[in-house]
Each structure stands twice: as structure tokens, then as C-alpha cells.
Image (spheres, helix red, strand yellow):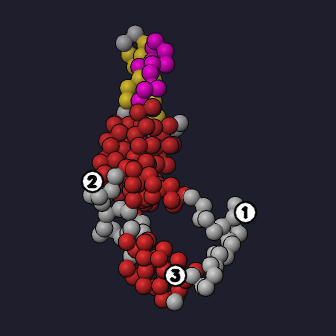
């Protein structure tokens, strides 16, 4: 559903968003359509593209994990914001020109709302916005055993070799929190031991 909504949004950016028509003495003398690939429409296009890519990543038979869900939700908000700003910023250029909204901008508006709705519907029922933001923060944060320059420092080993136990406890905690699967846990545990 997210892929369908975002793909429709991508297509809508290339459709007419704004139509200008100039008339003189009741006769139309010029008419032009502008697609959404200008100004705020480019931001909407990028948001729809990211939502498409995210919908194709991971296991399609399961709900989105917290981080992917939050990013997809954010892309829907960005697309909606860009379309609404474009709607609000469009007005008559001059007294002789009439400005109308093309069908592409309405499709983009519906697609952004569809992306938001699909992202919300296909999340884990236990996930909340607060959990999603925390997951996103953890994904962005620099690991504690690396330095700002990117070089990794070896983990400190406690007296008596407790480093393996600490690591095993960390793996168990990650498995219980759902950050890794049982299969990943078993693989990491076998490497550790």
C-alpha cells in the first residue's frame, strides 16, 4: 500500500499542478500548464521516492520495524507539507491571468495522505510515536566504542574476562527487545563463544 501510494505520488509530480490562462476581451489568448517538478514539488518528489525505496526494503510479509516506520511516516509528512505549501503559494500572477490547480496537485495531495495512512496502518500494533523516535535516535547515534573520527576502539575487558559475558548479556537484551531475530542471535552467539 505504501509503495502504491508513493508511486502514484511520483507520477503525480509530472502531471499538471498549475494552469495559467490569460484572456483578453473574453477570449483566451494564452494557456500554459506547469508540472510539480518545480520548487516545493521537487521536495515532494524526493519524499515519495524515499517512501518507495523504504517500502521495497525488508520483509514484505511483515509490518515495518520502528525505524523504517518512522522514516516512512516522516516522508509522508514531508510530501504533504510540500504539496500544501505549493497550494498555498499559488495565486494570480496578474489581473489578466487566471490560475487554476491542475489535477496533478490533487493526486499528489491524495498520495501523500495515502502514504501517511498506509504507514500508520502497517506498523506494529505495539509501536508508538515515542518508541519510533527512540529507535530512530538509536539508529543515528554514534556507537559508544567508536571515536568521532570513525576509528573503532576495542571493547574494554574487565578483569577475569567478563567481556564475553557482557557481550552475551547485550545480545540477549537485543533479542528480547526485538532488535535482532532469533537466527541473528544464534549466529552472533556462536561467533562470540
The picture places residue 132, in percent across and down from the top left corner, at 40, 54
The answer to whether residue 183 is above or below residue 45 is below
Residue at 72%, 63% (x, y): give it. Answer: 149
In the image, which disc is placed on residue 122?
Answer: none
> Could you classify mark 1 by the number of other residues whose Cα lies within 10 Å: few (under 14), some (14-19), or many (20 or more)?
few
Q: Which residue is mark 2?
A: 121
Which residue, as the protein is rendered here, is positioned at the far front? 159
The answer to whether residue 51 is above or below residue 172 is above
The picture places residue 59, in percent across and down from the top left corner, at 36, 70
Residue at 44%, 21% (x, y): give it. Answer: 91
Q: Nearer the viewer, mark 2 or mark 1?
A: 1
Q: Which numbered disc flags the more N-terminal residue, 2 or 3?
A: 2
Q: Which residue is mark 1?
A: 149
Residue at 51%, 43% (x, y): give it. Answer: 42
Estimate the spatial distance between the alpha carbons at disc 2 and disc 1, rounded to whole Å. 40 Å
Residue at disc 1, secondary structure: loop
The magenta region covers 87-98
Question: Do the CB atoms of the residues marked 3 and 1 lie less than 8 Å apart?
Answer: no
In this image, 155 relative to 69: left or right? right
The picture quadrant where one finds residue 25 is: top left
The picture places residue 190, in percent across and down from the top left corner, at 48, 89
User: Which quadrant of the figure contains the N terminus?
Assistant: bottom left
Residue at disc 3, secondary structure: helix
Residue at disc 2, secondary structure: helix
- Can the viewer see residue 10 in this picture? no
Depth check: give the residue in front, 123 or 114. Answer: 123
Estimate the spatial distance between the alpha carbons at disc 2 and disc 3, rounded to whole Å. 40 Å
Q: Which residue is mark 3?
A: 165
> Could you classify mark 2 by the number of other residues whose Cα lies within 10 Å: few (under 14), some (14-19), or many (20 or more)?
few
- Can the viewer see residue 103 in this picture? yes
Amino acid at each position: 500500500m505504501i509503495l502504491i501510494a508513493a508511486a502514484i505520488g511520483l507520477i503525480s509530480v509530472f502531471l499538471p499542478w498549475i494552469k495559467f490562462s490569460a484572456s483578453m476581451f473574453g477570449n483566451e489568448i494564452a494557456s500554459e500548464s506547469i508540472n510539480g517538478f518545480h520548487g516545493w514539488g521537487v521536495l515532494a518528489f524526493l519524499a515519495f521516492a524515499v517512501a518507495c525505496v523504504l517500502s521495497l526494503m525488508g520483509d514484505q510479509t511483515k509490518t515495518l520495524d520502528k525505524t523504517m516506520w518512522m522514516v516512512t511516516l516522516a516522508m509522508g509528512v514531508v510530501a504533504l507539507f510540500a504539496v500544501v505549501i505549493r497550494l498555498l503559494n499559488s495565486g494570480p500572477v496578474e489581473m489578466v491571468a487566471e490560475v487554476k490547480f491542475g489535477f496533478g496537485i490533487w493526486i499528489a495531495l491524495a498520495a501523500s495522505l495515502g502514504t501517511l495512512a498506509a504507514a500508520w496502518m502497517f506498523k506494529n500494533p505495539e509501536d508508538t510515536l515515542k518508541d519510533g523516535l527512540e529507535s530512530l535516535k538509536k539508529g543515528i547515534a554514534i556507537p559508544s566504542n567508536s571515536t568521532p573520527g570513525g576509528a573503532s576502539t576495542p571493547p574494554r575487558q574487565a578483569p577475569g574476562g567478563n567481556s564475553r559475558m557482557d557481550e552475551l548479556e547485550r545480545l540477549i537484551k537485543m533479542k528480547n527487545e526485538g532488535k535482532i531475530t532469533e537466527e541473528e542471535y544464534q549466529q552472533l552467539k556462536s561467533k562470540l563463544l
